[in-house]
């Protein structure tokens, strides 16, 4: 094969690999999902943790 053809093929392969890397990069959550996660954290997980801490404080008779 001609050297120029090989260089052209390698150049195209590099660009394809860069595009593939860009497409397969990890993407973060969108804004609505972030808001949903924050809501669940405050409305569901927060009170559960607070209840567990309250029970543990009562169990060890620690007053605040």
Image (spheres, rainbow, N blue to C red):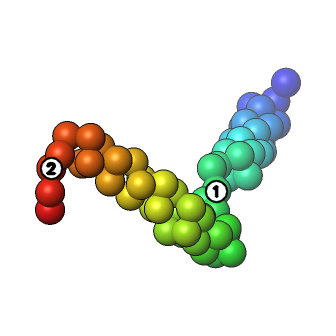
- Residue that carries the numbered disc 2 in the rendered image: 62
Q: CA distance from mark 2 to mark 1?
A: 45 Å
* Badge 2 vs badge 1, beta-carbon distance below 8 Å: no
Between 36 and 2, the one lying in front of the other is 36
Residue 56 in the figure: left or right of residue 45: left
The mark found on residue 43 in the picture is none
The spot of residue 35 in percent (x, y) is 60, 74
Q: Quadrant of residue 27?
A: bottom right
Between 62 and 30, the one lying in front of the other is 62
Q: From this viewpoint, which residue is outermost toward the right?
A: 1
Can residue 6 be seen from the camera position used here?
yes
Residue 10 in the figure: left or right of residue 50: right
Seen in the picture, residue 64 relative to 55 is either above or below; the reply is below
Q: Residue at x 39, y 48 (%)?
A: 52
Disc 2 vs disc 1: which is toward the camera? 2
- Residue that carries the numbered disc 1 in the rendered image: 27
Q: Residues within 10 Å of mark 1 (few under 14, many from 20)?
A: few
Can residue 15 be seen from the camera position used here?
no
């Amino acid at each position: 094969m001609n050297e120029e053809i090989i260089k052209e093929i390698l150049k195209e392969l590099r660009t394809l690999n860069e595009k593939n890397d860009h497409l397969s990069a990890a993407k973060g959550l969108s804004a609505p999902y972030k808001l949903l996660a924050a809501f669940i954290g405050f409305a569901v997980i927060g009170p559960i943790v607070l209840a567990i801490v309250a029970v543990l404080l009562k169990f060890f008779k620690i007053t605040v």
